[in-house]
Amino acid sequence: MTDSILKVTALNKSFGGIHATRDLHLEVTRGDIHAIIGPNGAGKTTLISQLSGQLKPSSGSIEFERKDITRLTTAKRARSGLARSFQITSVVMPLTLLENVMLAVQGTSGHSFRFWKPVKQDQQMVSAAMNSLTEVGLQDRADKIAAEVSHGEQRQLEVAMALAMKPRLLLLDEPMAGMGVEESQHMVDILKKLKEKCTILLIEHDMDAVFKLADQLSVLVDGHIIASNTVENIRANQEVQRAYLGEQHA
Amino acid sequence: MLPASNSGRVYAVLLILLGMAPFITSWIDQPFYLDLLSRALILAIAASSLNLILGYGGMVSLGHAAYLGIGAYCVGIPAYYDIYNGWIHLGLTIVVSASFAFLTGLIILRTKAVYFIMITLAFSQMVYFTFVSLEEYGGDDGLVIYLRSEFPSWLSMEGATALYYWIFGALVLTLLVIYRLVYSRFGRVIVGSKFNEERMQSLGFNTYRYRLTCYVISGVLCGIAGMLLGNFTSFISPEMMGWTRSGELIFMVVMGGASSFFGPLIGTSAFVFLEQYLPEIMKTINPSWHEYWHLPFGVLLVCLVLFGKGGIHGWLSRFDKDGDVK
């Protein structure tokens, strides 16, 4: 038996007449980088949003570490060890990179009904945040305002924030979106290091990156997972070739 | 801690001058100015409390004057029954404004943007009309408070100077509380939620609870301003919690500079003095014009919004970047 950290059973989500997720089953093994690939509009971000709690599924269940989390709020899932990053960069733009990461540290380290002591004097929090920034290579940019750094650096900040939450499962929604070749390579190196700390569920369009990183691969087409296997087996799978890879590598 | 920036020095000097105001006004023999200042500082407490939710929290309330009224009636109604004990007045103010903020906040904070504005307006109008219909306490005509809240002698409010120092002390305390709050763990959650609430939730924050708490704190601070206003004017009526007053509080915050620490104090002072002297200036131009002072005032506000980004504070801090006052 493999140790599964996330188990999704018969998940469905519809928006009016559109079935964005249909009878979706997924199991993620602890310690893996599990990538989900699929054409545009396959429902990848919809899936991530249901896993992290921003969207409520129409039916089905989500188990995280053998506990049913289908009805938990986003905040509760985050505190119990499930962190996500966003496809469209979502950080607190007017704050500095360090302040952003400190929010992430703060969110998962006890309550914040503390009204008097300035956070900046909390050495433990500052150093925890600096560690996360260092892991993604942003340590020298800590005092820059998030809105003023490059797109690539904002993507790295997304990852640093997710990391600062000390998650056991990290949901990454296209961390390489809009990145150049060099920046993508840098992100691949970062994610490889992260793998030692937590399980990663990765959505990514960049096939080179996916093949370099992933242990397991699931193919999502039309809201349904049509195949889930090791990278080698998926590459050999004829159906997948036709449904997805074929179009891309034509 | 010495303020390093030029605007910081301006504010430090301003606070020191405000602290010496009773001596200055009696020295130049103009007690009226002390009255004007007292009024300005009370409204500055109210505007600062609004700034906590509006400027830092992004919650635009068009009903904050309700708390001014609640605070004032927490003095007026006990006084009507000959209860003048200041601690009772203060305690009542805190309990009533906190409960009102909590109960209405439970609903208000589920809304966003325009709906937030409308529902805060609706709740404050409910309070307004409740007091209008309370015939026992004067209804529309209001209530006269014959004696000020009674405190032990070292804290007495008797006399213009003593009351001024009460107000000044309350303002300094309010500013200190807001300053500490904004940079504390709690404040960071509030500021983060203003810009990106979804992200804050995905970082593990139950933003609703934190914002509700912030809303209650702001309501209590404004309630205390109302308690002081009741003591200052010694005549209270539902008029002081009308929605136009709530609108004026927003003006004061925006004029001074929202989400700047001293902005509301500057904005309120500017507002109160303009309100006082614009009619007189208009009168010198043409004796029948003094009623039309709202017109130049409106033009001034439009200009401030168009050209003075960040209000008066924003304008002041432009001098900081160049290193010296031009």
Image: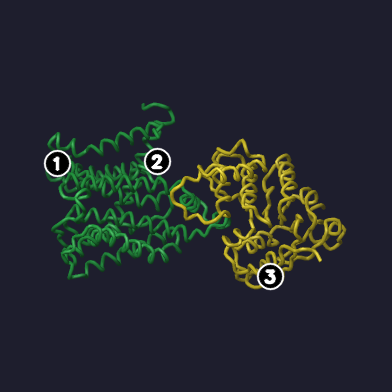
Chain colours: A yellow, B green
**Where residue B175 is drawn, which disc sits there?**
none
Quadrant housing residue A58: bottom right
**In the rendered view, would you say A95 is above or below A74?**
above
Q: Relative to B44, is B25 above or below?
A: above
Q: Is residue A146 visible?
A: no
Q: Nearer the viewer's eye, disc 1 or disc 2? A: 1
Which quadrant holds residue B303?
A: top left
Q: Amino acid at mark 3?
A: Leu
Q: Nearer the viewer, residue A54 or B202?
A: B202
The image position of residue A206, as x and y in percent, is: 74, 49
Residue at label 3? A11
Residue A24, given in percent of the width and then of the height, sits at: 72, 68
Which residue in the structure is indicated by mark 2?
Answer: B309
Secondary structure beneath label 1? helix
**Is residue B151 shown to the viewer in this render?**
yes
Find the distance from the CA under tag 1 to the CA under tag 3. 74 Å
Which amino acid lies under the numbered mark 1 shown in the image of this protein? Answer: Pro
C-alpha span from label 1 to label 2: 35 Å
Residue B119 placement (x, y as % from top left): 38, 64
- Quick check: do tags 2 and 3 share a chain? no
Q: Nearest to the eye among marks 2 and 3: give it.
A: 3
Q: Which mark is residue B31?
A: 1
- The residue nearer to you, when weighing A213 against B18, is B18
Left or right, B25 with respect to B186, comes to left
Quadrant of the frame with the N terminus of chain A: bottom right
